[in-house]
Structures are given as structure tokens and as C-alpha cells.
Amino acid sequence: MKTGRLEAFSDGVFAIIITIMVLELKVPHGGTLEALRPLLPGFLSYVLSFVYVGIYWNNRHHLLHAAQHVTGGTLWANLHLLFWLSLTPFTTAWMGENNSTSWPVALYGMVLVCSSIAYFILSQVMVASHGAGSKLADSIGRDTKGKISAAVYLVAIPLSFRWPLRACAGYALVAMMWLLPDPRIERSV
């Protein structure tokens, strides 16, 4: 099967995830800038999550662009990734609603680490179907940024029970690391 149908379906899911997240933003009660202050934690959670969803959309797009075909395993691995990403609106809203307290921040991190594992599985399934010497395999390489990201999440989750804002800073640091375009796939395609 060609990659187009998988990409179209996934793009729709990504659009729904972003739509749900933005619908969780509350309208301020009042017409002053001061009325926005209580909404700031929810807005910051939304911005961070929007960046993460955008990063996954962008990287998955590049991954599929490097692929020649998709297999049944690829379809299931992609659904696995979409499952974890679909939990992002819930954890985003909970974290924003509760001013980044311990459990919401920890659960947010758990969804991040599970999403990163799911993306790793997706990329490995795709490499396996294309072969170790394929252009796709060369473009993914050792995935050092992915491994560093998972390590930061795994440190930040327990950290959230003592210093939740430091855990959030770890999540933001990983997002900033991924905002710089990853040239691996673009170079090889």
C-alpha cells in the first residue's frame, strides 16, 4: 500500500487532537487583560502541547515521505502512536486546570514518554519493512535526539512529584530541542 491513505487518515486525527485542545481553552470572565491571568496556566499547557503535536506531525510526515510503502505492521504502529497522542488534550487540560500540580504533570510526562516510544516503534517497523540498508534506515540513523527525549521524560516524571514546574521545564526543553528541524530525513530524501 502507498503512504497516501495512511498520511491522510493520520492528518485528520492530528487536526482533531488540535481542535479538541483549543476547545478546552476557557474564555475569560471580564474584558480586561487582568481577566486573562487565571487562564495563563491552561494557555501555556496548550502552547506546549500544540508544539508537541506539531513536532510529531512534522516528523511522521518526513518519515512517511522517506517510505516507499506501508505494511499492516506500519498501520498498527501508526495507530499506536495516534492513541498516545490522542490523550494529549486530556492531559493538557488537566495540567492547565490544576496549575501544573504533581499528578497532572506526571501523567502529562507519561503520555509524552509513551508517545516517544510509540514513534520509535513506528520508525523501527517501517525500517524493518524497507530493509536495514534502505534510504529510510539511513535517514533515521541512531535517533540520538529521540533517546535523549525519552531520558528527559523519565527523569521529569518522578521529578514532578517534588518540583512539578521543573518537570514542565524539562518537557519544554525537549520541545525546544525538536523545534530545530531534524535534517536526517530531509538530507536522505
Image: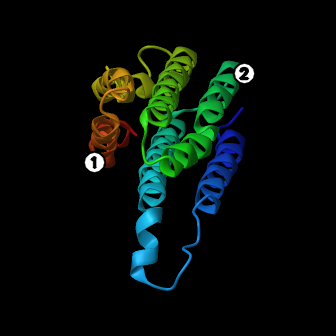
The residue under label 1 is: 180
* Placement of 25 over or under 86, stated as above or below: below
Q: Nearer the viewer, residue 2 or 72?
A: 72
Inspect the image, locate mark 2, and give the three-letter code of the amino acid beneath it: Gly
Question: What percent of the width, then of the height, locates residue 119?
Answer: 50, 28
Measuring from the top left, give residue 103's x and y in whole percent. Answer: 48, 31
Residue 67 sits above or below residue 46 on the image: above
Label 1, secondary structure: give it: loop
Identify whether 12 is placed above or below 111: below
Answer left or right for 16 relative to 173. right
Q: Residues within 10 Å of mark 2 (few under 14, many from 20)?
A: few
- Residue 58 horizontal side relative to residue 27, left or right: left
Structural distance between the alpha carbons of marks 2 and 1: 32 Å
SS for dot 2: helix
The residue closer to the viewer here, 187 or 93, is: 93
- Residue 69 showing in the rendered view: no
> Foreground: 161 or 188?
161
Which residue position is annotated with label 2?
72
